[in-house]
């Protein structure tokens, strides 16, 4: 870049960004990390602000609670409720997992096999996953904290 010489060059190709200007940034990441493979993007619209932070604190506090049953009551997690289709749901267990991502796969351009790269220590990510397992009368159903909070909201309405 030449100081004092910033201007656009129109080269007949419709581009308005000159050689002295940076092109506007664009997203290079097209997938959403850490979603289950069967996740439906339109299926979970939990609009609660900072639900990920609420979930993190829930996991930290629940796992160290001396009285998990009372903790669940304080958090307004329903033990016995109905879903939006009217099916009865009964809480069986709360599951938490510690997850550490230490590698990455990337598709090669043009398809073909995937490329694997171990992550450097600064890029390793750690998180906890929280799931609520309810029985719906015929099978176990795994729900997220957002799902459970919606159930609790429907029960209070």
Image: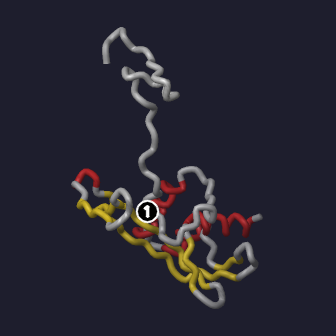
Give left or right: position of 2 versus 18. left
Q: Position of residue 41 (x, y in %)?
A: 58, 62
Using the rendered image of the protein, determine whether residue 102 is visible from the camera's viewpoint.
no
Give left or right: position of 89 versus 3. right
Q: Position of residue 20 (x, y in %)?
A: 37, 20
Q: Position of residue 14 (x, y in %)?
A: 52, 28
Crowd tier of the residue under label 1, counting other residues whose Cα lies within 10 Å: few below 14, some 14–19, many 20 or above:
few
Does residue 112 lie above or below 32 as drawn? below
Q: On the image, numbered disc 1 is attached to which residue? A: 34
Does residue 38 lie above or below 13 as drawn? below
Q: Residue at x 54, y 56 (%)?
A: 51
Does residue 86 lie above or below 10 as drawn? below
Question: The C terminus lies in which quarter of the figure?
Answer: bottom right
**Colour scheme of the picture:** secondary structure
Which quadrant of the view contains residue 110?
A: bottom left
Closer-to-camera residue (139/56): 139
Closer-to-camera residue (64/117): 117
Which quadrant of the view contains residue 77?
A: bottom right
Q: Residue at x 47, y 57 (%)?
A: 32
Q: Position of residue 102 (x, y in %)?
A: 27, 63
Q: Residue at x 31, y 14 (%)?
A: 2
- Of all residues, the one furthest to the top in this rendering is 4
């Amino acid at each position: 870049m030449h100081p004092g010489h910033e201007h656009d060059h129109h080269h007949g190709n419709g581009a308005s960004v000159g050689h002295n200007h940076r092109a506007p940034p664009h997203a290079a990441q097209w997938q959403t990390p850490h979603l289950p493979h069967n996740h439906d993007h339109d299926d979970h619209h939990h609009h609660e602000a900072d639900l990920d932070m609420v979930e993190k604190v829930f996991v930290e506090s629940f796992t160290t609670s001396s009285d998990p049953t009372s903790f669940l009551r304080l958090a307004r997690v329903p033990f016995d409720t109905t879903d939006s289709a009217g099916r009865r749901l009964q809480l069986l267990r709360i599951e938490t997992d510690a997850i550490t991502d230490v590698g990455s796969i990337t598709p090669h351009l043009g398809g073909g096999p995937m490329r694997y790269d171990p992550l450097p220590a600064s890029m390793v990510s750690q998180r906890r996953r929280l799931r609520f397992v309810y029985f719906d009368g015929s099978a176990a159903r795994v729900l997220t904290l957002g799902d459970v909070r919606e159930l609790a909201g429907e029960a209070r309405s």
